[in-house]
Amino acid sequence: MPPYPRAMRWHDAIAIFIQERLQAKLDKLEQDDSKRQELLVQHQRAAWLEDAARRVAQIQAVTHSLKPIHPDARGTNLYVDPASLPALQELGSHALEQSFAGDVVGNAAALDVHKFLKLEVDGTSLLAALIANDEGALQALHDDPEQAAGLRDAFVGLTQPRAGGPSSHTRAKQLYWLTGSDACADTGYELLAPLFATSLAHAVHAQVQEDRFGEANKAARQARRERKAHGGVFHDYPGLAVQKMGGTKPQNISQLNSERGGVNYLMASLPPVWRSSDVRLPLHASSVFDKLFVARPEVRRTVRELRAFLASDPEPNLQTRERRASLIDALIDEMVSLGGEVQQALAAGWTRDAERFGNLVREEQLWLDPLRSELNGEAEFARDWLRMDWPAQVGRRFANWLNSQLFGQLPVGDAEAREWKKELLTDEDGFVQQLRELRKRLDAPAYIPIRKTHDELVMQRGGTE
């Protein structure tokens, strides 16, 4: 019978695997070492496959393992295809479906057989091909169909339960589960022996590793730390714990445990702690500066510090200017955070709710609800947004608010207000950056007027447009 094309690919993959193992061992020996010839004989294709088929009985492929429950426990391990499990709403091994990593327990000296069975051709592992009785994989094992079938049965036995039936151990966990209606009747219970879902734990570990240390999450974490807008998602796992299994020899637990260095993640299993929402809404308010903005703890702290600093009559030098600028920047950062939080907490168009938010001044509606511009029937709102004179009006309101916070203890007036407004509208890392990203989305002009608002220009021209 001529070989299948896939059989040739399997044949080549097996030959490369055996040769690489042989070469790795030969590289450790001197050229005149007598063991070299012995290794060459052992790694002849037929001899190695027969030896691997014999040693495969020393290990077992599993998806649910007993060893993680207690390293000295002896008993049944299970290999269950996750796709064959019933679908549940709760997270479980069934969620893995076809995308899962099978684990291996048993004699660590025979783990090379498992690596052999993980060889892939066209996205299918050798073990999966043999389970499916793939003709190409069988031909690659041996030219004689009977001998190929014998090798196949030995290798596929890796996934089969061990002889003797299910068993547990004194160091394994066991619990009685009530199945009847009478809790006092001994016959109304089933004895359960929980196993560790090792394939699921491995998938969870891989996801958590990516979420914690992947490049995408690093960029999101940096943006969060610097309070900058970011288009990605930031993942965090509060209260995450690490359970180390196997000590200095994690391979004694399982192959996947060894690949993780013994690390297994435990999610926090704690009752939720209620916290009021950090985002307060401008209900029936004419401006967010009157109550919402000033109610933020960091804003109150910064205003107190700025008031005390200016009241100390500092020297008019570079250090004073930098200190003042730093405090103003902190207030601007809080403005940017407030804007982002409100935009995320409420759906686009929330300012159309006249009963709750109708009192909010137009320029602050344009600032806090920019995506209303994309909704049907909002052509006028979109035109107002695209004119881009509202940022200067927001800047004026911010400046007047800050003057009101300082007035009474400090002689502040128009000159100071102009300075506060200018710093807001030229803050490239905060307010302006937030606007720049929105302008790209809404196709707005790149230029933001700083010195004059539209209304101010109209007044300057005599009150008519």
Image (spheres, grey):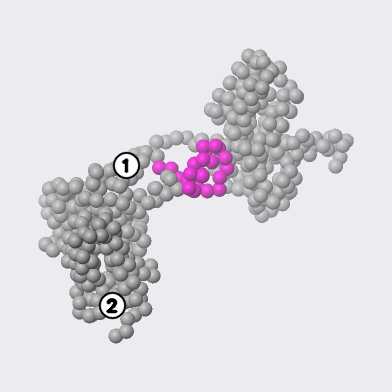
Q: Residue at x 61, y 18 (%)?
A: 309
Q: Is residue 165 left or right of residue 144?
A: left
What's the amino acid at mark 2? Gln
Mark 1 closeness class: few <14, some 14–19, many ≥20 residues within 10 Å: few
Residue at image point 27% right, 63% down = 22
Numbered range of the magenta stretch:
215-237
Q: List x then y, in percent, for residue 117.
A: 28, 65
* Pointer 2 or 1: first along the chain: 2
Amino acid type, mark 1: Val
Residue 255, picture quadrant: bottom left
Left or right: 444 with respect to 27? right
Residue farthest to the front, as pictured:
32
Q: Which residue is mark 1?
A: 242
Q: Position of residue 325 (x, y in %)?
A: 64, 27
Going 70% across and 38% down the picture, which residue do you hit? Answer: 391
Q: Quarter-wise, where is residue 457 in the image?
A: top right
Magenta stretch: includes residue 222? yes
How far, Cα to Cα, is label 2 from label 1?
A: 45 Å
**The residue tagged with tag 2: helix, strand or loop?**
helix
Residue 139 is labelled as: 2
